[in-house]
Amino acid sequence: MKPGRTRRRVGVLPGFGPTLGITVFMVSVVVVIPLTGLFVRSAGLGFGGVWETVTTSRVLAAFRLSFGASLIAAAINAVVGFLVAWTLVRYEFPGKRIVDALVDLPFALPTAVSGIALTALFAPQGWVGRLLAPLGLPVAFTPLGVTVALIFIGLPFVVRTLQPALMDLDAEVEEAAAVLGAGRLQILGRVILPTVLPALLTGTTLAFARAVGEYGSVVFISGNMPHKTEIVPLLIVAKLEQYDYAGATAIGAVMLVLSFAILLAVNLLQGWTGRYREGN
Amino acid sequence: MAGAGARHRAAARPRPGVGETAPVRRLLIAATLLVLGCVLVLPLVSVFAEALRGGLGAYLASFRDPEALAAIRLTLLVAAIAVPVNIVFGLSAAWAIAKFSFPGKRLLITLIDLPYAVSPVVSGLVYIMIYGAHGVLGPWLAAHDLQVIFAVPGIVLATIFVTFPFVARELIPLMEEQGTEQEQAAMTLGASGWQTFRRVTLPNVRWALLYGVILCNARAMGEFGAVSVVSGHIRGKTATMPLQVEILYNEYNYVAAFAVASLLAMLALATLVAKAVVERRAGAASAQLATTGTATELQPREAP
């Protein structure tokens, strides 16, 4: 009876029943049932079974690499993304519109294409790899290569989250700081950074979340050596190829729990951002 | 609200005396261009350079391969199914969520968003656990001679999963902001529900819908991880374009791999252009709406 009551309160618009029906049906079939299925299957393994699978040295090494490389890539993206967002919001220069559109390239380019392109660039004979090899800095097929791919894939998250926050900055506050004798760096550190910090953290967390689950752009450049350059999503694929469904389920369930935790963190951060803006 | 945002933004533009000195500004712009050149442009250029390494003849010959053509056809087929499903779902979800209030709305939105947070590989895995030979429905499907995993239906399902939020997430905030007044006015004037939707709601959200469709299509054609897990990589049968790229690359057939990849890169570039155009059109449309002072401005703010 609840929908009927709400319909009267909101107005005369029809179609609540059918559209909600389609929505709930699709969400159930596409999202809820499959994801629940994975948890039910992993519950079948028991906590001990899951624990045993994910604490083998190969899996632990993969988790270390996935989280370590994602963390480093997200940190680098926070700095680079801030620079890019700042330049795009504050300055005018020829070709700015094209540059701005190009920031979304990692979203638009299929990950397999990014993967083979980055590998071709950073392989020992590649355009960039050739320059780095004499320096004793091999990138392709090392953890460094994994990080490079994750930087590529995560950059737009930081830029796109920061841009609106930088646009919303009040010029008056900066002016007041300048009038009171603060230098540009002081204003940046004491006025601008604290204000956009929630957005910066949200963008960085989003980049990190994407990086942890990323597959296509990493598998080509990483070389996929167990214990060394094997990321967690690849390990799931490897387990599936060996028909180790229990192992794949266990790792997949842990990954899911971690992604939900990150999603929750992002939501809390966004709540913080919203409150901050409202306070202004 | 859109009007207020625009005013606020105009006020926030840096003023003389607050901005950086010219040399610092130039340095920062140069640094940005250098970084983006290395991180974004270089990989993009290398796709085309590698594809054309053997000359134009070898590049074009890659597309005479029947397997490459089959991959292109399959990719188009998958997008042709996944995108319309997404449109119908997105419009339904946005209508129910934005135009009505009901308990559990936040939860529903979170569930729609969930596929964003899930690793593509895990997305593929969950479908294997349901429809695969060892899956929950596996025995039933086998008994009825239906194959989902390692076949086209699995690829379509995985694609729908990863693109699930794209259209809905563009429409929901916009339709929430637009409220229900225009629709109610149309209904009061005697329009049927369907007419109201087609003549009032749809024109109001057409740019956001198009935007969502563009993004959805790009992801549907380019998805790799989720599709890779459920497809089984059967050449000429269940290999989409990104999977064909992988197959060719792993066979050291670099020119052919990059040739197929170059098509996907062109799709990405077309997506970026279309996206920029739609963004500008949508911006112009909402600015027009704000100056003529229609429902967006008059609508009272929702109580927090």
Image (spheres, helix red, strand yellow):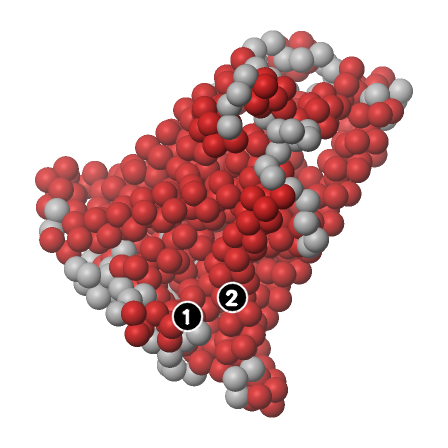
User: Taking A40 as reference, is A199 left or right?
Assistant: right
Judged from this view, the residue extending furthest toward the front is A181
Percent of width and height locating residue A119: 39, 69
**Residue closer to the observer: A55 or B88:** A55
Give the labeled residue for mark 2.
B42
How packed is label 1: few (under 14 Cα within 10 Å), some, or many (20 or more)? some
Q: Residue at x 49, y 66 (%)?
A: B43
User: In what element is the residue under mark 1?
Assistant: loop
Are discs 1 and 2 both within one chain? no
Name which residue type carries label 2: Leu
Q: Is residue B110 visible?
A: no
In the picture, the quarter occupied by the C terminus of chain B is top right
Q: Residue at x 77, y 28 (%)?
A: B193
Percent of width and height locating residue B173: 62, 29
Q: Residue at x 79, y 31 (%)?
A: B287
Check contact, mark 1 vs mark 2: CB within 8 A: yes
**Residue closer to the observer: B219 or A231:** A231
Give the labeled residue for mark 1.
A128
- For the residues marked 1 and 2, what is the alpha-carbon distance in whole angstroms? 9 Å
Percent of width and height locating residue B183: 78, 23
For residue A96, above or below residue A14: below
User: In what element is the residue under mark 2?
Assistant: helix
Percent of width and height locating residue B188: 85, 17
Name which residue type carries label 1: Val
The chain holding disc 1 is A
